Image (cartoon, rainbow, N blue to C red):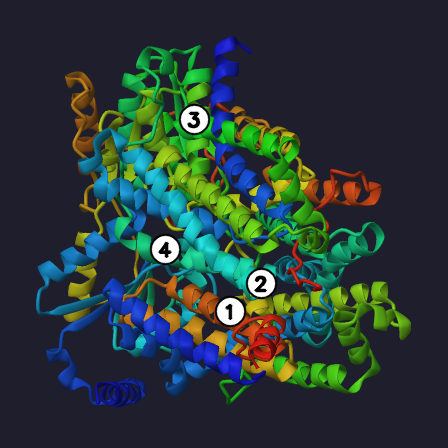
């Protein structure tokens, strides 16, 4: 009977996987199993969606050499540990945990599965078999800031964030500094809504920013609600993580794109040729994991040129938004309406 | 503080308040009939996903009628899910608290399951039906710029208030909620009345849910109501089970929530934001204590609230 | 019937679930198998099941006591949170206390914290006749805000890069994941012990008798001298204490850190456990295990069959629906009567 066969299959597989990996020389011939732990749904057109695109690229690029599975909607609490252990039990040898809140769970699971290599996104804890990886999201913010500074008519731009964590703060600062560089008169209005996910609240907050005079709004939250409000209010906005123009065809000027494919491919290759080592990777536009969405047709030529110049400068290393006469206050948040003065130092990348 | 600023703020407040008002109005009727339905959040989510799915799947075919049909679909979905509760609580006499909670958990799960294929999609927003020169006008939009659901919510709360206090049918419903056995002995059909009330509550909860997925943010995301169903419940309590106070209370909550955002955007935060977020619930508890202690008639919980109907005959 | 209905509920849920999943397009039987059977037959999942079951059982034991007296504590989730915060707070104020001292203190603080939070609805009920359902429920959301405030403000981890979370508990302040050499979590041992305690309490003590009487026949209870007020206080405090205990045990033995993901909904799921277990301690114990299986199985099913992880909630709610529906079979005996007796007798007599 089918059920009986399945039960036996499960038992044998489980038992087999529980054996220590002795004499697995034949393993090299099998495809490398890569696992992904996702925070949200793969269809969210945001954070998780972009990781999923990376996973698909990995499958395409190393077809036949890797197999890649994922688990979505994994909460950032202790229940993530069994999920990670399951992936390890099922034979995945390289596992990417794609959210900051998985940090301790990754370390814990890694302790129990020393043969498996773990990579934690946006974290800072390492181990012999745990590395971290991050993207220079602020580079995208710099491009958006440039565009915002040039296209704002009210000289008030807005930023909708979730919590005052380093990543968000860096983003706000990069956005503001870049805008100020092209338009010294701008001020940034900032709202932190203290939640990662609440579309209605995001919409209300975006509305509020618009009411307070912002005519370009950037966001660091998990839904395109902000852009939808921008579209309604006939102001501009930027997508984050993915091209969100389908939600706001007129308002969406561009978006910073998270392109995880190249990173995943490189790490899988390192596994395949045995050169994997725990790393603290902080890639960006130059390495190809951050890109920009096509400009909206309303963006004028001179603005595009300016933005393109920033992109080119970022890629060849000649431009960095965090330079110039600014004080170093690592870790300090950005509270007031004028975010130009405080900034988060470059050493934040080392999470010190 | 210019006029434009006030208008802008009002528009935001209305947007924030409407779904809570809708859900709470429905629950008010339910509770007035003596039933406590804790499944609001679940029904709202089912309504949200249904409305979105209908709009998405049949939008192109229905054209201009699409959002109306979708909202109708959301209402029907709300009614159907409320019937799940009603059959258990009324005909089978089950514990209303547990049944309502089960409905919420079920609704959250079911909506996520159904909605899984719709994540990342969008539909046209269900915006104002008034002509653009009215709805878009910087001043007149405070009256005409809203989705039809906003006006529907206002009409409903007045209609419910009038129904409960000025019609015979409303009186009967209130009687059923205050003393079901007496109502039964007079000859009023207690169970069918409660069924109707629960269905009404379900419809409004479903419509309230659709407001999220079709007006505020025309998309679907899991648990996108983010706890508004519980605020609606708190609102019914806070209002002392009176429609007029429900309307005032809803806007009061809405103003609180909007103020919090303005304060943050302007850099003020003299009290932590969590304090404001907790305010609706704290106030609901305080009001509960006050009205239960004073025993002011007409402003208490319906006496039979939450108790299954066991006819003595 | 008392025992048959919970079993039937579970089986019916499995059947219904399989059908629904097939209709939606997933592999129904496989999904059910993974959710309900795999956690039981796969040995490396046992620890996960026991870990998940412990808080559910502990909280539900307390809730069942009150439920027998028809006192509905819906706010267990809030008491769980406050208990955990209270216990963690003790740890933060006494950072250098040795393990054998701090652990009992933390546990005591957790219990007291939960009791204190449950005292509010108790006071409101006895003093102002406020429904404990509504008051305890509202307080859950207040507790959530207290949590958000503390972990985002005064108790924020200074090394946490501004993320809303507490500092991690030191090893002296933590419990191991499992007793050495076994897969049994310490929380589960507590659950077993408490099950016995509650069983003795409810079936063998005068107190237990008084609680049941107050619930079943309030007038008789008054006649017997059982004070309803005292029952309200005692049952709410006990269930609050249990919820707080579960909270601090979770905080101490899982990740050792309280963050936004900490409220796991155990307080609400425990209500289902309490009903499924028919308010009887042993039943609650078994029901807790079953619901833990659905949690763990739901996540396994997500990994293997790719059903959304929301399905665990659907199963749990469905089991509750069935058990509530079958409640009527327990309270009343089913007799098939064609019509109301009197007219029938009249007709029978008339025609005789």
Determine the chain carrying the residue at label 3.
A
Same chain for labels 3 and 2? Say yes or no: no
| Disc 4: host chain | B
How far apart marks 3 and 4 lie (CA) works out to: 27 Å
Q: Which residue is mark 2?
A: B98
Q: Which residue is label 1 attached to? A: C320
Few, some or many C-alpha atoms within 10 Å of disc 4 (few <14, some 14-19, many ≥20)? many
- Closest to the camera, between mark 1 and mark 3, is 1
A124 to B258, vertically: above or below: below
Figure check: A13 above or below B78 = below
Q: Secondary structure at mark 4?
A: helix
Viewer-proximal residue among A39 and C221? C221
SS assignment at label 2: helix
Residue B34 seen anywhere in this rendered image of the structure = yes
What SS does tag 1 mark? helix
Disc 2: CA contacts within 10 A as few (<14), some (14-19) or many (>=20): many
Residue C321 horizontal/vertical position (percent): 49, 67
Chain hosting mark 1? C
CB atoms at circles 1 and 3 under 8 Å apart?
A: no
Front: mark 4 or 1: 1
Name the residue carrying label 4: B112
Considering the image in quadrants, where does the C terminus of chain B appear? bottom right
The residues tagged by marks 3 and 2 sit, at their Cα atoms, a distance apart of 38 Å
Q: Are marks 4 and 2 in contact (CB under 8 Å)?
A: no
Question: Badge 3 is on which residue?
Answer: A207
Q: Position of residue B12 (x, y in %)?
A: 48, 25
Quadrant of the image occupied by residue B121: top left
Camera-side residue of A58 and B307: B307
| Mark 3 Cα-neighbour bin, 10 Å: few <14, some 14–19, many ≥20 | many
């Amino acid at each position: 009977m089918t059920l009986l066969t399945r039960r036996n299959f499960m038992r044998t597989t489980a038992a087999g996987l529980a054996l220590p990996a002795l004499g697995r020389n034949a393993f090299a011939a099998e495809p490398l199993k890569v696992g992904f732990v996702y925070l949200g749904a793969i269809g969210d057109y945001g954070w998780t969606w972009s990781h999923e695109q990376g996973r698909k690229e990995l499958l395409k690029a190393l077809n036949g050499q890797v197999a890649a599975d994922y688990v979505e909607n994994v909460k950032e609490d202790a229940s993530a540990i069994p999920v990670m252990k399951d992936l390890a039990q099922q034979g995945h040898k390289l596992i990417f945990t794609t959210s900051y809140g998985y940090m301790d769970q990754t370390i814990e699971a890694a302790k129990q599965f020393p043969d498996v290599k773990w990579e934690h996104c946006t974290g800072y804890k390492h181990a012999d078999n745990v590395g971290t990886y991050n993207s220079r999201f602020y580079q995208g913010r710099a491009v958006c800031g440039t565009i915002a500074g040039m296209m704002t008519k009210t000289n008030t731009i807005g930023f909708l964030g979730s919590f005052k964590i380093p990543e968000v703060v860096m983003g706000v600062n990069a956005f503001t500094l870049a805008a100020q560089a092209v338009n010294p008169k701008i001020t940034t209005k900032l709202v932190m809504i203290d939640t990662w996910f609440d579309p209605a609240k995001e919409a209300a907050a975006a509305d509020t920013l618009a009411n307070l005079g912002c005519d370009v709004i950037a966001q660091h939250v998990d839904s395109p609600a902000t852009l939808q409000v921008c579209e309604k209010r006939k102001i501009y906005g930027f997508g984050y993580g993915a091209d969100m123009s389908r939600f706001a065809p007129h308002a969406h000027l561009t978006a910073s794109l998270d392109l995880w494919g190249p990173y995943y491919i490189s790490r899988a290759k390192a596994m395949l040729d045995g050169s994997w080592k725990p790393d603290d990777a902080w890639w960006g536009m130059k390495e190809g994991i951050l890109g920009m969405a096509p400009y909206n047709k309303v963006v004028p030529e001179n603005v595009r040129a300016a933005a393109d110049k920033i992109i080119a400068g970022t890629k060849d290393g000649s431009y960095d938004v965090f330079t110039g006469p600014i004080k170093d206050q690592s870790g300090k948040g950005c509270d007031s309406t004028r975010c130009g003065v405080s900034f988060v130092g470059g050493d934040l990348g080392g999470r010190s | 503080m210019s006029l434009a600023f006030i208008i802008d703020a009002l528009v935001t407040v209305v947007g924030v308040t409407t779904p809570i008002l809708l859900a709470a109005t429905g629950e008010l009727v339910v509770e007035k009939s003596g039933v406590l339905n804790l499944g609001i959040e679940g029904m709202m989510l089912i309504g949200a996903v249904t409305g979105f799915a209908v709009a998405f799947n049949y939008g192109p075919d229905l054209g201009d009628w699409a959002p109306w049909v979708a909202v109708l679909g959301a209402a029907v979905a709300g009614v159907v899910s409320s019937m799940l509760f009603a059959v258990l609580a009324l005909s089978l006499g089950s514990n209303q608290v547990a049944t309502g909670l089960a409905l919420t958990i079920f609704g959250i799960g079911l909506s996520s399951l159904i909605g899984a294929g719709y994540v990342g999609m969008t539909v046209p927003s269900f915006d104002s039906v008034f002509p653009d020169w009215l709805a878009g006008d910087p001043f007149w939009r405070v009256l005409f710029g809203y989705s039809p659901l906003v006006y529907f919510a206002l009409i409903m709360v007045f209609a419910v208030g009038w129904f409960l206090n000025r019609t015979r049918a409303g009186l009967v419903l209130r009687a059923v909620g205050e003393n079901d056995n007496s109502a039964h002995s007079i000859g009023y059909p207690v169970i069918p009345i409660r069924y109707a009330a629960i269905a009404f509550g379900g419809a409004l909860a479903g419509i309230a849910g659709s407001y999220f997925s079709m007006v505020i943010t025309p998309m679907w995301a899991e648990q996108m109501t983010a706890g508004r169903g519980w605020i609606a419940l708190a609102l019914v309590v806070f209002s002392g089970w009176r429609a007029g106070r429900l309307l005032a209370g809803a806007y009061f909550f809405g103003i609180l929530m909007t103020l919090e955002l303005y304060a943050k955007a302007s850099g003020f935060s003299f009290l932590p934001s969590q304090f404001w977020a907790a305010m609706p619930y704290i106030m609901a508890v305080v009001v509960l204590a006050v009205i239960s202690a004073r025993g002011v008639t007409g402003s208490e919980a319906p006496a039979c609230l939450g108790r299954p109907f066991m006819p003595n005959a | 019937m008392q025992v048959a209905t919970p079993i039937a509920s579970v089986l019916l849920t499995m059947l219904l679930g399989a059908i629904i999943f097939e209709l939606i397009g997933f592999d129904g039987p496989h999904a059910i198998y993974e959710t309900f059977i795999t956690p039981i037959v796969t040995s490396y999942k046992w620890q996960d099941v026991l870990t998940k079951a412990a808080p559910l059982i502990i909280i539900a034991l307390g809730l069942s006591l009150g439920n027998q007296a028809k006192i509905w504590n819906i706010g267990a989730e809030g008491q769980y949170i406050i208990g955990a915060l209270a216990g963690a707070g003790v740890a933060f104020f006494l950072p250098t206390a040795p393990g054998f001292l701090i652990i009992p203190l933390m546990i005591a603080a957790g219990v007291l914290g939960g009791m204190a939070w449950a005292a509010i609805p108790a006071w409101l009920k006895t003093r102002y006749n406020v429904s404990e359902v509504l008051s305890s429920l509202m307080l859950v959301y207040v507790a959530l805000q207290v949590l958000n405030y503390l972990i985002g403000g005064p108790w924020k981890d200074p090394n946490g890069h501004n993320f809303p979370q507490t500092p991690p508990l030191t090893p002296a302040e933590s419990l191991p994941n499992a007793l050495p050499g076994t897969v049994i979590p310490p929380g589960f041992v507590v659950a077993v012990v408490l099950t016995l305690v509650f069983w003795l309490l409810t079936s063998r003590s005068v107190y237990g008798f008084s609680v049941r009487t107050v619930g079943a026949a309030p007038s008789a209870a008054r006649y017997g001298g059982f004070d309803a007020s005292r029952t309200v206080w005692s049952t709410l405090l006990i269930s609050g204490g249990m919820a707080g205990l579960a909270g601090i045990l979770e905080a101490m033995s899982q990740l050792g850190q309280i963050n936004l993901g900490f409220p796991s909904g155990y307080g609400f799921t425990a209500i289902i456990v309490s009903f499924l277990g028919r308010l009887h301690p042993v039943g609650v114990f078994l029901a807790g295990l079953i619901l833990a299986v659905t949690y763990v199985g739901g996540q396994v099913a997500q990994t293997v069959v790719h059903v959304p992880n929301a399905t665990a909630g659907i199963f749990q709610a469905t089991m509750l629906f069935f058990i509530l529906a079958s409640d009527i079979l327990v309270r009343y005996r089913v007799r098939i009567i064609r019509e109301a007796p009197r007219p029938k007798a009249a007709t029978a007599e008339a025609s005789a």
